[in-house]
Image (spheres, rainbow, N blue to C red):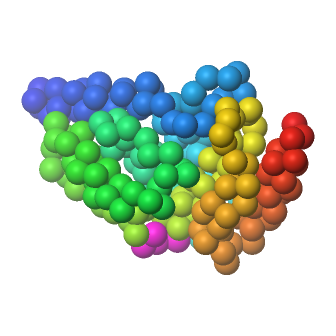
Amino acid sequence: MIRSQLQGCLDFIRHAEALKHTLRSAHTSAGRHESTAEHTWRLCLMAMVFESEFAGLDMLKLLKICLIHDLGEAIGGDTPAVAQASDPDKSARERADLQTLLAPLEVPHRAEFLALWDEYETAASPEARLAKGLDKLETIIQHNQAEQPPPFDYHFNLEYGRKHMEGHPLLGAIRALLDEDTRQRAAGGP
């Protein structure tokens, strides 16, 4: 790798650091806002924990998709889960932000990362569909794990991302457990 390519990679990595301080609307169990980087880390951890249930899938590709899926938020910030349905420009904005973030990289890296993001966004592969389902489940786990400040409505979790779990037995089983947690939280329980 030549010096200018190395510099481009380092510039990209430096800019991606913004995910560490890009806050999401959910809170951690310690009571502070969670960052997008923290969400992405736990999403990847979930994929690894359940790897044995994903026979026939490309685990490296799944992890890459998980790492890339919210990268554009380093520029434009997070759109809270409760606001996503009413934001028709979210996808286009995140894609444009991702392209800006990827600019310091050489064309092959930019093309690979953007293709992975597009694959996630359109759920074009089994790995992308799984990443979408796990992403929604991780969000629900975070909503339920911590005390979310008012006016958070825990009932939101009961429908959030449900379509991304359909047809996958493991995701359905996890969802059933999380729905129990959600009902307990909605009723004022821990």
Please name whichever residue, 161 or 16, is drawn nearer the observer in this view of the structure: 161
Q: Which residues are magenta?
A: 123-127
Residue at horizontal 59%, vertical 68%? Answer: 164
Residue at the spot x=49%, y=52% of the render?
83
Where's the N terminus, which quadrant? top left
**In the image, residue 72 lies at what x, y percent?**
33, 44
Instruction: Specify whether 153 is left or right of 67.
Output: right
- Magenta-drawn stretch, dominant element (helix, strand or loop): loop
Look at the image and tell me in which quarter the C terminus lies. top right
Query: Which residue sits at x=16%, y=36%?
Result: 104
Query: Percent position (x, y) of residue 121?
Result: 40, 63
The outermost residue toward the bottom is 167
**On the picture, is 101 further left or further right than 81?**
left
186 over 85 or under it: above or below: above
Image location of residue 22, percent across then percent down: 43, 30
- Residue 53 in view, yes or no: no
Q: Image quadrant of residue 155?
A: bottom right
